Image (spheres, coloured by chain):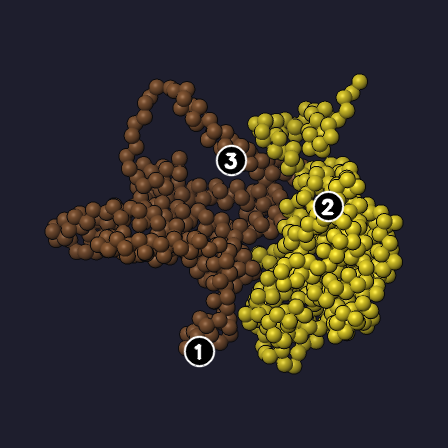
Chain colours: A brown, B yellow
Amino acid sequence: MAFGAFATGTAREQGPRRKSRIALLLLLPGILYLMLFFLVPLVSLVLTSLQEPAPMGDIGEYQTAFKWENYVDVIGTYGEHILRSFIYAILATIFALLFSYPLAYFIGVKARRWPLVQNLLLVLVIAPFFISFLLRTLAWKSILSDEGVVISGLKALSLMAPDAHFTGTGAAVVFGLTYNFIPFMTLPLYSTLERLDTRLLEAGGDLYSKPSTTFFKVTIPLSMSGIVSGVLLTFIPAAGDYINASRNFLGGSGTAMIGNVIESNFLVTLNYPAAASLSIILMAVILVMVTVYVKRSGTEDLL
Amino acid sequence: MAKPLPEDPFIRDLVLRAQRAQLSRRTMLKGAGVGAAALTLAACSTGAQDKPKPAEDISDTDKTVRWDNWALYLDVDDDGNYPSLEGFEKQTGIKATYTEAVDDNDTYYGKVKDQLKLGQDIGCDVVCLTDWMIARWIRFGYGQELDRTRMPNVESNLVDALKNVDFDPGRKISIPWQGGFAGIAWNKDEIPEGLTSVSDLWDPSLKGRVGVLSEMRDTMGCIMQDLGTQIDGNWGDAEFTAAIDVLQKQVTDGQIRNIKGNSYKEDLVNGDTLAAIVWSGDITQLNAEAGEHWDFAVPDKGGTLWNDNFIVPIGSGHKKNAEDLINYYYDPEVAAMVAAWVNYIPPVKGAKEAMMDLDPELADNQLIFPSDATLANTHLFRTLSAAEEQKYATQFQAILLGA
């Protein structure tokens, strides 16, 4: 299962091969839970995505059917939004990785000598979790507003055109996504880098490799499981995020992501089949991208 | 002899479905899911059904009423109590629970629609929603018919203009709570010369600093009137599309920066928006809270007029208590007390006179007690048919999503 990827890659112990009733019994609550809260909603979602408007029906009235054209319709209408979602999510993941790796490396490797600093920095990474995600995003919105210090400062220094603005643009959305998911990237990276054996880095140096070569040939491969976990934890929720891109937060009318389209179809136009087919498409694309990514990054054993 | 059907509407519905048991391709498809899935489907099915039946009224034995309303929509004192509601409890002995549960017509509807369809209790006995959403509830039979003889204040004090509306002739199911205008507002410090019409918002000097509302009827109503359409008249696709084209162009050109619901106020305060299509009462409140920076005007070619209305959900067992509550708020003095705080238009005759005693300055405020001339220039957006609602909402949402 893909969830295995979030574990930090130690070899699994072989369990007893005999069939055991107790094991089944212990699994039962989990299986029932998944059936009730994952499988049933999924089946219901698939069936909704194939519904057609009820004849003579009022707004939001649909009946069971096999209208697979719904999928073609939403891809035609919202293809741009689907593409935009994944571009934003990929950009945010890359930025979060570039930002988090040095940070996690510093906390996990360089700061080993000072446990107090290490703990303090970890608290700083986790601290934003204590404040609501929505509040943090709203705070950024007012910090980055036209009349705020940042933007008016940039304008005063002529680094931004006088009539330019930041909130409501795609850059603001990617910024918000990156910011909000940095802890999800930093923590898994930290947990692998913390156990990095620094003697291996010394060995690299002893064998006349440049520090950069050691980094790419030793450090990166050893921290791969952290990178994969961090990327998955960032990319999957970022692709489906609808808060940052919402017009009420950092986005504008040109930045809607697939989550915003689903929200609008579900709540405003009451087009449930379109919302359901978009959700299924989102899940399917994420599943394919994650599978390919995990295979390419050579960590299949994590799946 | 047939067994009587169970009381619970949800179980009754399931039993009825089982009795029908038509083995068509459709039911086969439903049966394809596991048993539990079929149960979920029955609960979520959105197919056309019979209208739900009103719940039994237990008001006589249970003296409570639960009221769902929008934020900042009832007078509140510094301790967070609602003085007018406390007056109601004292007068009637009915315990009222007030919840700011309505954030938006659409999200509220999304939250309660499945229970309404089954005639179940949605956790409130009276709720205030906007005209067009009330029209939808009435079409689906989600509101209980009110007994006007139990509401003498409503009978005598409801303003004439609102006694008859196309979605509820004779006001049998809905009673107005507060009304307001959508018009234009601007930042007085940045635009000292002011604005007069919606087209002034498209001035190049305001590029990227203009906001419009995500409430379709208010934004489109203002733009359509600017193009010369009578929005309460008999217009059609051509007029709507012409206004959509204007909106699309202004969004594409970057003239309109944002299209928002209630949160547009933050943008006015932080300066992202300098001029916008807004709701009248908000500007009075905003000026009181954040300094006198904004002015409001009904556009010269017309603004929109809307009302939020009380409705008693079909599954509520406290209709009589809810009627008492509505009746209480039609007392002119109570209406003035609320209007002094919320700054919207009370639909109650005599509220202006009562306001004279309370706060003479507010009694002259055109946004709370509009003159006939102001009212003549604001119009209700005509009620749309189900098909029109779907079509126009989709067109409007497409712009919001930048499709």
Amino acid of disc 1: Ala
Q: Residues within 10 Å of mark 3 (few under 14, many from 20)?
A: few
Badges 1 and 3: C-beta atoms under 8 Å apart?
Answer: no
Q: Which mark is residue B382?
A: none
The residue singled out by tag 3 in the image is: A38
Helix, strand or loop at disc 2? Answer: strand
Q: Are marks 1 and 3 on the same chain?
A: yes
**Direction from residue B328 to residue B41 in the image, left or right:** left
The residue singled out by tag 2 in the image is: B64
Amino acid of disc 3: Phe
- Please, is residue A192 above or below residue B334 in the view? above
Badges 3 and 2: C-beta atoms under 8 Å apart?
Answer: no
Residue occupying the point 75% across, 60% down = B178
Residue occupying the point 15% across, 51% down = A202
Q: Chain of mark 2?
A: B
**Which of B198/A139 is in front?**
A139
Amino acid of disc 2: Thr
Residue B141 image offset from top left, x and y in percent: 77, 43
Q: Are marks 3 and 2 on the same chain?
A: no
Helix, strand or loop at disc 1? Answer: helix
Residue B108 image offset from top left, x and y in percent: 65, 49
Residue B343 image offset from top left, x and y in percent: 71, 66
